[in-house]
Image (spheres, rainbow, N blue to C red):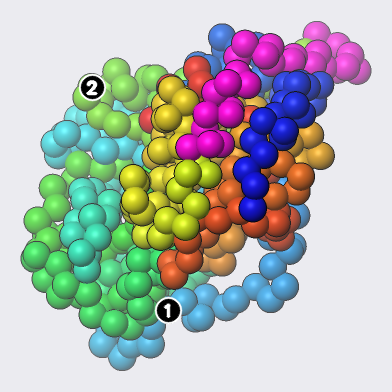
Amino acid sequence: MPLRVGGFLHEARQDLAFRPRLRRPHLARRAIPVIGVALAVVLITDLLVLAGLDGVQERAALDVRRPPAAGDYVAASGQVPTNAVAPLGKLARPHLFVVAPAALKPEQVDKVRRQKGVKAVEIADAADVNLGGWRVPTMGVDPSTFRAFTPKKTASSDELWANVAAGDVVVSYELGKEGGLKLGDDVRTPGAEMRVGAYATVGMGSIHAVVSRDTATRLGLPHGNAMVVSAPSVDSAKLRKALLKVLPGSQIATINPVVIAPPRRHIAQPQRVVQWPVSALMSVPQIETALKAAASKLGSRYVWGAEGPDTFDCSGLVQWAYAQAGVRMPRVTNQQWATGPQVPLSQAQPGDLLFWRNDPTNPGYISHVAIYWGNGQMLHSPRTGDVVKIAPLNTRNLAGVVRVSPQVAAQVR
């Protein structure tokens, strides 16, 4: 297939007439903050994971023909009765995920609990663990209480949390399917051998595995160095800044962010549309370089977690290709979703990023990314057993299109 990069780029006029808008507070979670490039950089930096911020989430969920039952992704087990964990209470939507350099002190946790708008806090353990040869960010949790902070499908499964209590590991759907960790199989770690008890993407930072805190101790995870915070009525970016002062040196990711729109003087007055100037986005030479770099890897093998130069997963390919154009992209897919403004599919241009929600265990989660090649085609690293290829654009479960801003991308952590 001839690589007509230059021919496609005549389309790249950076037509920025799309209309992203701030919403009223009760719709704020579904808004993208676009109030000029300077403020956008600050806000999108704070909003690390922007999954579920537009109406595409509901449409994507409807595209799934048969919503799988929770049991489809939970290994059968008679080791521990389901009543070994407390019944699910009220769900607590997570908004911030904290990983501290050491165990959180009781006085630090108390200060977080007393922050305005904080409704619930859950303490956990977090570190990378070698699972079956993969380096996997892992959380140690109390199955009875942590379940309330997970997506409803996962939270509702007594069997899943009983398996965690019995010593199983729950891995993300992506790691299970693409990393070859099969449901019900044993997986070796330096500290223990565990069974894969379920597939469940919890959507907290880049966490791909969850175990009980007892199991975390056996694996050597730091004790009590992580925290999940639910604060549904306060601006997540502002709360994050406040917590960084309370927890110096910590990494704090914003998940399911709450964005409070500024009040308008007259409710009936139309909202002002702010366009992104061309200078805030990738230049045509940068787009051409990134596309050529990606195309140079056609035929390279997909490997989960691989960043190149010879093997790639989907987001690893994006990060590598855009780095060749001098654009510093974050590593994982749901971070790359936050690297610029969203545009309608009808306005997609070569070099834009395409995102999908294909994870049946967490239908709102951004789980795959591709590079728009032009003329209805995309370039991507699809899945285990496949290779980097150019393919027709698939719109099933498509979450949206993002036009990359180098300034914003460099700030996303």
- Could you say which is closer to the camera, residue 380 or residue 80? 380
Q: Confirm whether residue 14 shows in the render.
A: yes
Residue 226 position by quadrant:
top left
The x and y percentages for residue 17 are 81, 21
Rendered residue at 27%/22% (across/down): 246
Q: Can you identify the residue that label 2 sits on?
A: 248
Q: Which mark is residue 74?
A: 1
List the single residue furthest toward the bottom. 78
Q: Secondary structure at mark 1?
A: loop
Of pointers 1 and 2, the one earlier in the residue sequence: 1
Rendered residue at 14%/67% (across/down): 189
The x and y percentages for residue 223 are 14, 48
Q: Distance of mark 1 from mark 2, alpha carbons?
A: 38 Å
Please give the count of numbered marks on the rendered protein. 2
Q: Is residue 271 magenta?
A: yes
Q: Confirm whether residue 151 shows in the render.
A: no
The x and y percentages for residue 211 are 26, 64
- Could you say which is closer to the camera, residue 376 or residue 138? 376
Q: Which mark is residue 18?
A: none
Which stretch did the figure color magenta?
265-293
Rendered residue at 37%/60% (across/down): 303
List the single residue furthest toward the front. 2
In the image: residue 396, left or right of residue 128:
right
Q: Is residue 225 magenta?
A: no
Rendered residue at 64%/53% (across/down): 1
The x and y percentages for residue 40 are 58, 17
- Could you say which is closer to the camera, residue 376 or residue 92? 376
Q: Quadrant of the C terminus?
A: top left
In the image: residue 353, left or right of residue 300:
right
